[in-house]
């Protein structure tokens, strides 16, 4: 017997690389534009003297601004340190039963990591061949909870609100977490469901469409009772999750709707341009409704056996995209949408590597 036997062992999530020098970075779905100028103002006028005190544990002002923006009550909003923190708290709060939590086999690869670290039993349900989800797979199947990323990552596939509602409605005894990290890039949100069903939580992030990945601000919507349960767990782990600059800058970001709409529409336009270019180079992909494209090239896969060589070739040219070295995913590259200039450089670098 040694202390090793008492350790909570786990296989951690592998985040995308964050090279500390200037590269064309299309590997972690960040926003290629800076955050709102209102965020900059917050930092420039931030009173560092205030840091000697603890931040507001209930994050009242940020919660209120988010609630107001989405037309919800403050009691229906939860905030955390990026949506990873929010999702992790959701797993800890809502998945304490014995039945397996279910989610797709191809989805955000943090879900199984949280399930493992919290000792939550889970089952992964295969997506259809075209990477879409069959709502029937989530109906009439015993489960202790459901997680659906919509649009899904890394596939980019969007499910209809109708499909999400059918799943929520058919599982009144399970909490359904809908991870809407990428919903601002063209999807229909499940927010209307929270006033109709008690068993749904929607998670969001400021990391993608609000250009604040470095600040770590995530949030969730749900009915007041569910949000209270979530806060009870949060206050049982760490009361002061959000630091003062994040609270203030997150509020400034949510309130600058004009800037938000401008950068998301720019990303969407560049995404559509990138899709056309990739298509003309023989790539295929599902119709992404996110700020990335998950694409494969049959000719490359036939030549190389996977997309790994192209991924590495791009990296040599200082262009970072994401490659998942797993059986179902290795034939794909996940390419985040950068600026027009970055995407042109990416396409130009890609061309000579193709068969
Ligand atoms: N959900 C999905 C589907 C994601 O891809 C990401 C980004 N890795 C997150 C949640 C977490 O984002 P963040 O913690 O930056 O809010």
Image (cartoon, grey):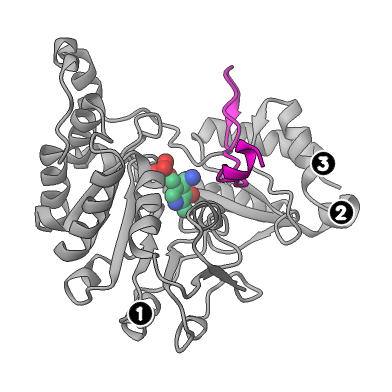
Task: Check mark 3 vs ligand 1: CB closer than 8 Å? yes or no.
Answer: no
Marks 2 and 3 sit apart, C-alpha to C-alpha, by 9 Å
- Left or right, 294 with respect to 136, comes to right
Q: Which mark is residue 309?
A: 3
Q: Crowding near pointer 3: few (<14 within 10 Å), some, many (20+)?
A: some
Residue 151 appears at what percent x and percent y? 45, 61
Q: Residue furthest front?
A: 1
Asked which quadrant contains residue 47, the reply is top left
Residue 213 appears at what percent x and percent y? 40, 34
Secondary element at image label 1: helix
Q: Does residue 233 lie above or below 98 as drawn?
A: above
Residue matched to label 2: 305
Task: Check mark 1 vs ligand 1: CB closer than 8 Å? yes or no.
Answer: no
1 and 2 marks in contact (CB < 8 Å): no
Residue depicted at x 31% and y 60%: 202
Task: Say which of 252 and 291 sits in front.
Answer: 252
Residue depicted at x 46% and y 37%: 30
Residue matched to label 1: 162
Asked which quadrant contains residue 313, the reply is top right
Q: Does residue 320 lie above or below 66 as drawn?
A: above
* In magenta stretch: residue 273: no
Residue 321 appears at what percent x and percent y? 64, 39
Marks 1 and 2 sit apart, C-alpha to C-alpha, by 38 Å
What's the magenta region?
A: 1-26
């Amino acid at each position: 017997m040694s202390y090793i036997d008492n350790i909570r062992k786990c296989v951690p999530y592998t985040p995308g690389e964050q090279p500390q020098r200037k590269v064309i970075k299309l590997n972690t779905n960040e926003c290629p534009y800076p955050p709102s100028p209102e965020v900059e103002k917050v930092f420039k006028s931030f009173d560092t003297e205030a840091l000697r005190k603890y931040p507001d544990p209930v994050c009242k002002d940020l919660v209120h601004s988010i609630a107001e923006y989405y037309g919800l009550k403050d009691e229906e909003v939860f905030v955390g340190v990026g949506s990873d923190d929010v999702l992790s708290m959701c797993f800890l709060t809502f998945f304490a039963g014995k039945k397996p939590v279910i989610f797709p086999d191809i989805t955000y690869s943090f879900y199984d990591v949280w399930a493992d670290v919290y000792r939550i039993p889970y089952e992964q349900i295969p997506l259809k061949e075209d990477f879409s989800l069959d709502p029937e797979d989530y109906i009439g199947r015993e489960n202790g909870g459901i997680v659906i990323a919509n649009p899904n990552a890394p596939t980019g596939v969007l499910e209809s609100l109708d499909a999400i509602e059918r799943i929520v409605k058919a599982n009144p005894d399970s909490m359904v977490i809908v991870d809407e990290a990428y919903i601002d890039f063209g999807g229909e949100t499940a927010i209307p469901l929270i006033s109709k069903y008690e068993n749904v939580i929607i998670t969001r992030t400021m990391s993608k469409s609000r250009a604040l990945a470095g600040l770590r601000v995530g949030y969730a919507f749900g009915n007041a009772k569910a949000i209270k349960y979530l806060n009870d767990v949060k206050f049982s782990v760490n009361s002061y999750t959000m630091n003062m600059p994040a609270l203030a800058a997150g509020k400034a970001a949510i309130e600058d709707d004009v800037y938000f709409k401008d950068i998301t529409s720019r990303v969407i336009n560049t995404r559509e341009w990138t899709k056309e270019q990739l298509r003309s180079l023989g790539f295929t992909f599902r119709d992404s409704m996110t700020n990335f494209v998950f694409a494969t090239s049959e000719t490359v896969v036939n030549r190389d056996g996977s997309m790994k060589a192209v991924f590495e070739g791009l990296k040599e040219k200082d262009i970072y995209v994401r490659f998942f070295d797993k059986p179902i995913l290795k034939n794909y590259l996940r390419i985040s949408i950068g600026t027009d200039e970055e995407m042109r450089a990416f396409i130009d670098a890609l061309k000579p590597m193709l068969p």
